[in-house]
């Protein structure tokens, strides 16, 4: 697991700006607290390479990335991501045709470890928001094993209220049932949810569900995004 850092605008203004939002200071007892629904991949977590975690997979594991995309991600992943199929049995079925000597455990370790670079700037802003009373939930399309890896192995569970993910809900972003189930999980009213996501489709769907939603482009920090809510 690696860490990245970058420009962090908005920090100096946040403590002042947060008291100017309609609900006042979130840390005050009885205040209506917003709930940040934070996407994972592409926002908080990135691959070790600029492109994909699988950039070197043919060299390292002897797996053709095109065949991996077709045989695993196109055919099997849609069921895995919503919990209809478990990851390990699917890999046991797929891997012998992709690279006979690669065990599922080896593949998973390769994948997860290369798709685990935490953006320290985003994580620090999460801490600032939480210290000001904002609840933060990871809100992501994940299967069960990687969701556990994110929370436990990578330690993200120490920085958020919890994780809401597709395999556990049986539905994925941008489907409406995902947003309805996520809102029930947090216990906050619908209009207090604030999605930050790098998918425009997910942002549009969240807004249609009654949430605030912002498309993540790295042009603004999380703190600047929350400034806009005022």
Image (tube, rainbow, N blue to C red):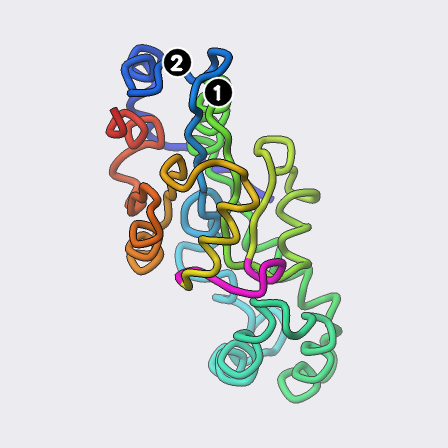
> In this rendering, is residue 112 above or below 139?
below
Per the image, the residue denoted by label 1 is: 133
Magenta residues span: 166-174
Sequence-first disc among 2 and 1: 2
The quarter of the picture where residue 100 lies is bottom right
Nearer to me, 142 or 30: 30
Is residue 122 within the magenta segment? no
> In this rendering, is residue 210 above or below 189?
below
Position in image of residue 137 (x %, y %): 52, 39
Position in image of residue 94 (x %, y %): 65, 83
Q: Which label is found at residue 25?
A: 2
The quarter of the picture where residue 114 lies is bottom right
Badge 1 crowding class, 10 Å Cα cut-off, few under 14, some 14 to 19, many 20 or more, is: many
Nearer to me, 200 or 20: 20
Position in image of residue 83 (x %, y %): 63, 68
The quarter of the picture where residue 154 lies is top right
Looking at the image, which residue is at 45% across and 53% down? 179
Whether pointer 2 and pointer 1 mark residues with C-beta atoms closer than 8 Å, the reply is: yes
Compute the Cα span from label 2 to label 1. Answer: 8 Å
Looking at the image, which residue is at 47% across and 81% down? 66
**Element marked by disc 2:** loop
Q: Viewed as shown, does residue 153 lie left or right of 77?
A: right
Q: Quick one: quadrant of the N terminus?
A: top right
Position in image of residue 115 (x %, y %): 54, 54
Q: Quick one: quadrant of the C terminus?
A: top left
Q: Viewed as shown, does residue 203 lie left or right of 52?
A: left
Looking at the image, which residue is at 46% across and 42% down? 44
């Amino acid at each position: 697991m690696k860490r990245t850092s970058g420009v962090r605008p908005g920090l100096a203004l946040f403590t002042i700006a947060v008291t100017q939002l309609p609900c006042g200071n979130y840390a005050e007892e009885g205040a209506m607290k917003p709930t940040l629904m934070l996407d994972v991949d592409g926002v908080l977590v990135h691959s070790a390479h600029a492109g994909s975690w699988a950039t070197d997979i043919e060299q390292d594991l002897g797996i053709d990335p095109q065949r991996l995309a077709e045989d695993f991600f196109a055919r099997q992943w849609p069921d895995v991501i919503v919990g209809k199929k478990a990851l390990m049995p699917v890999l046991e079925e797929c891997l012998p045709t992709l690279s006979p000597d690669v065990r599922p455990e080896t593949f998973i370790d390769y994948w997860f470890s290369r798709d685990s670079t935490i953006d320290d700037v985003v994580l620090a802003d999460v801490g600032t928001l939480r210290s000001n009373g904002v609840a933060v939930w990871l809100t992501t399309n994940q299967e069960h094993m990687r969701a556990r890896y994110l929370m436990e192995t990578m330690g993200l569970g120490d920085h958020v209220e919890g994780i809401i993910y597709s395999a556990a809900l049986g539905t994925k972003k941008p489907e409406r049932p995902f947003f309805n189930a996520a809102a029930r999980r947090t216990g906050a009213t619908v209009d207090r949810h604030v999605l930050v996501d790098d998918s425009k489709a997910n942002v549009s769907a969240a807004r249609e569900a009654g949430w605030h939603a912002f498309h993540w482009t790295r042009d603004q920090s999380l703190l600047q995004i929350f400034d806009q809510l005022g």
